[in-house]
Amino acid sequence: MKPVKPIRIAVASGKGGTGKTTIATSLALSLADHTSVNFLDCDVEAPNAHLLLKPQFNAHQQAVTRIPEVLPDKCNLCGKCVEVCQFHALAKIGQKILVFPQLCHGCGSCTWNCPQEAIREKENPIGELQAGSAQSGAIRFAQGLLTIAEPMPTPIIRQLKKWQVLQDDAVTILDSPPGASCSVVETLRGSDFAILVTEPTPFGLHDLKQIVGILHDLKIPAGVVINRDGIGEPIIEEYLLQKNIPILMRIPFSSIYAAGIAAGKTLVEIEPDLKKNFLKLYDHIKQASGGEKSA
């Protein structure tokens, strides 16, 4: 019999400020009372889940990409590397091949296609991976930190998801970056279910539609948490009914919640009874995603 592969749940939003991390951290705390949890903060440009879960970091690893280095004594300036690079990370200027690391995606095409074997790859540091434990060890927490001015968060997210510091038998929650960019797609990739956090406003609806389109292409089932419920018009409900996407939970617009979160508390610390709601949400996810998977 094949071993069971625990569910991977991505928490995403089409825009920033909807309360995505608020939902992700409270779900993690609710599940931690009953099972082991991995929590990945994939918002590597501005990670903030650690402010709420307060992990003790005990593991660090440099995040790198591999970029080309041209060997002048072997290069005959044929320009094949420039020709095959889809990202314009190399250019032939006079009697030299120039490399622009900020444009390089590390695909290796230039190295593979060089007829003179005049290109080797070298490590290019782009940030750091950090891991630790929270909630007395029930939550294994990991995050990436992209170095300021580095242009591409996707490689560090990919490395974070593969980092061998996580618990094999734990439910994994991935806190996605906001928006609908490549970094969001990389976070969502491989997930069994996506929780979409939105707010009942025209901006919330506009950006929700973008992330729903991405999930449709990735064939990942999803449900929605409506945060700040009670403001605006019922435009979110009408759209979700049309798309047959379930509402998993509603978080009412509350000054008490706002004050607590501003003070660094999670929703379930502000109102412990909400843990029951998050556990019901998790039960729905298990059913919608077909339960835990065989590895």
Image (cartoon, grey):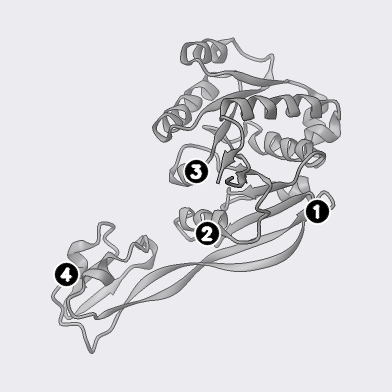
- Gap between marks 1 and 2 measured at Cα: 23 Å
SS at circle 2? helix
CA–CA distance in space, label 4 to label 3: 35 Å
Figure check: 44 above or below 98: above
Tell whether label 1 touches label 3 (CB within 8 Å).
Answer: no
Which comes before the other along the chain, label 2 or label 4?
Answer: 4
Residue 251, percent from left and from top: 72, 22
Q: CA distance from mark 2 to mark 4?
A: 29 Å
Q: Amino acid at mark 4?
A: Lys
Q: Amino acid at mark 1?
A: Gly
Q: Give the crowd class for mark 2: few <14, some 14-19, many >=20 residues within 10 Å.
A: some
x and y, in percent, of residue 257 in the image: 79, 28
State which tag comes first along the sequence, 4 or 3.
4
Q: Residue furthest left?
A: 78
Foreground: 251 or 103?
251
Q: Residue at x 68, y 49 (%)?
A: 169
- Residue 106: quarter of image: bottom left
Q: Amino acid at mark 3?
A: Gly
Identify the element where label 1 is drawn.
loop
**Residue bearing the label numbered 4:** 80
